[in-house]
Image (cartoon, grey):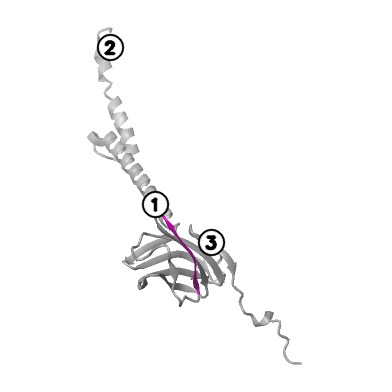
Amino acid sequence: MFGVEPRQLPRSPELPPLRSSLTVAASGCFPHGSKSRVRSIRFAASHDAESSQSHVHFDEKLHDSVVMVTQESDSSFLVKVGFLKILHRYEITFTLPPVHRLSKDVRETPVPSLHLKLLSVMPIPEGYSVKCEYSAHKEGVLKEEMLLACEGGPDTCVRVMVQARVMDRHHGTPMLLDGVRCVGAELEYDSEHSDWRGFD
């Protein structure tokens, strides 16, 4: 009796099949030799994918939260200021990189835009800090041009195109980018609220 029990104890190979069946049920019917390995690889891959996607999403959010300045040529820049609301005025501040055409005496050309007004240009280590005022006068994707000049003459002009996406008044208030600040609303003419009483 005592000698029979040691022979029956090693016959407990039922434990490995029990463990393997549990593993297959958890991992989804994979081959016997790659159960635990496949589970660990799948977890690491999904974790890396999630972290990389969240990282890209964060970069895109950061990228979309500031005023974008793109140099299109040696003397031309495109400044994207994001969404604005119609009939509102905005103070916009952005940085132009160092341009050999400009110097400390930067000024606006004598023929300014009706809806874009230069407020100041300050030399900074990164180039020039430009501050202007933009009036969102109608709905749509609008572009207003501003020419910066120096004392050197017309050949020293730098063209700055400010692009805005103007929403109508029924779409709420947009979230402004860093560098954009609302400074007031434009008066809208409405005949119902006119003070004119007509002829006596």
Residue placed farthest to the bottom in the image? 200
Q: Nearer the viewer, residue 79 or 104?
A: 104
Question: If you read the primary sequence from the N terminus, does the residue marked by circle 1 or circle 3 appear first?
Answer: 1
Whole-percent x and y of residue 23? 32, 34
- The amino acid marked with disc number 3 is Arg
Q: Looking at the image, can residue 76 be seen? A: yes
**Do the CB atoms of the residues marked 1 and 2 lie less than 8 Å apart?**
no
Q: Nearer the viewer, residue 46 or 182?
A: 182
The numbered mark at residue 181 is 3
The region drawn magenta spans 115-125
Identify the secondary structure beneath mark 2: helix
- The amino acid marked with disc number 1 is Asp
Q: Looking at the image, can residue 131 be seen? A: no
- Neighbor class of circle 3 (other Cα within 10 Å; few <14, some 14-19, many 20+) is some
Question: If you read the primary sequence from the N terminus, does the residue marked by circle 1 or circle 2 appear first?
Answer: 2
The quarter of the picture where the C terminus appears is: bottom right
- Neighbor class of circle 1 (other Cα within 10 Å; few <14, some 14-19, many 20+) is few
Q: Is residue 124 magenta?
A: yes
Residue annotated with mark 1? 59
Residue annotated with mark 2? 5
Residue located 35% across and 62% down the image? 99
Whole-percent x and y of residue 59? 39, 52
Residue placed farthest to the top in the image? 2
Which mark's residue is nearer the viewer, 2 or 3?
A: 3
Which mark's residue is nearer the viewer, 1 or 3?
A: 3
Looking at the magenta stretch, what is its main secondary structure? strand
Task: Say which quarter of the image contains residue 11.
Answer: top left
Residue located 26% across and 12% down the image? 6
- The amino acid marked with disc number 2 is Glu
